Image: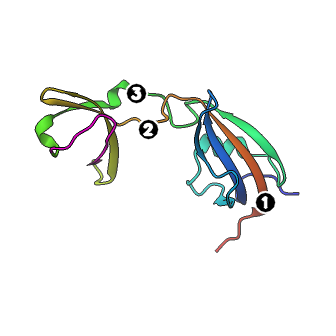
């Protein structure tokens, strides 16, 4: 039986949880998702934690913040002038900015103070240890094209 490792394709169900047990995302009870190991679509720490698992196995994989979405960084909090935004602003709203490469960079409004708006560009799960509950359905060698 093939183990998950580099150059494998996998089919799995998962639940992404915080250490508290709160479920952040899940496809448990739904159709499994298919992924290719090494294609950049899986969180690197999660992908590495899957290595060695086989079809039919279930596991709880503990991923540190550093191996997950990274540490929370104070420098990712930015303050902007209020007049740079449209009229409707609410704390908790996600706003989109263009980064230096013209890619989309989402930020969450965390405070609105007089003429200033504070935006957090950290990933919402940055600084959080995570638990992935997984059920592996299939593991196959990747087919080269």
Residue furthest to the bottom in view is 145
> Which quadrant is home to the C terminus?
bottom right
Percent position of residue 43, x then y: 58, 45
Label 3 Cα crowd, 10 Å radius (few <14 / some 14-19 / many 20+): few
Residue that carries the numbered disc 1 in the rendered image: 138
- In this rendering, is residue 99 above or below 7? above
Instruction: Identify the secondary structure beneath mark 3.
Output: loop
Instruction: Identify the secondary structure beneath mark 2.
Output: loop
Left-right relation of 76 to 9: left
What residue appears at the point 71 percent right and 55 percent down from the top-left corner?
12
- In this rendering, is residue 100 above or below 66? below
For marks 3 and 1, give the one nearer the viewer: 1
Q: Which range of residues does the magenta coloring cover?
A: 87-98
> Which quadrant is home to the N terminus?
bottom right
Percent position of residue 106, x then y: 34, 45
What residue appears at the point 33 percent right and 52 percent down from the top-left corner?
104
**What is the quadrant of residue 139 in the picture?**
bottom right
Residue that carries the numbered disc 2 in the rendered image: 123
Between discs 3 and 1, the one toward the N terminus: 3
Between discs 1 and 2, the one toward the N terminus: 2
Residue that carries the numbered disc 3 in the rendered image: 73
Whether residue 76 is in magenta: the answer is no
């Amino acid at each position: 039986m093939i183990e998950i490792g580099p150059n494998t394709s996998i089919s799995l169900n998962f639940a992404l949880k915080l250490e508290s047990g709160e479920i952040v995302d899940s496809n448990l009870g739904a159709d499994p998702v298919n992924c290719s190991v090494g294609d950049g679509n899986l969180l690197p720490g999660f992908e590495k934690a899957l290595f060695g698992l086989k079809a039919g196995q279930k596991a709880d994989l503990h991923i540190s913040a550093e191996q997950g979405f990274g540490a929370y960084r104070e420098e990712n909090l930015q303050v902007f002038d209020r007049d740079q935004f449209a009229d409707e602003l609410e704390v908790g709203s996600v706003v989109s900015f263009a980064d230096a490469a013209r890619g989309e960079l989402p930020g969450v409004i965390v405070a609105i103070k007089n003429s200033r708006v504070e935006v957090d560009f950290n990933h919402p799960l940055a600084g959080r240890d995570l638990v992935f509950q997984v059920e592996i359905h299939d593991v196959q060698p990747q087919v080269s094209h």
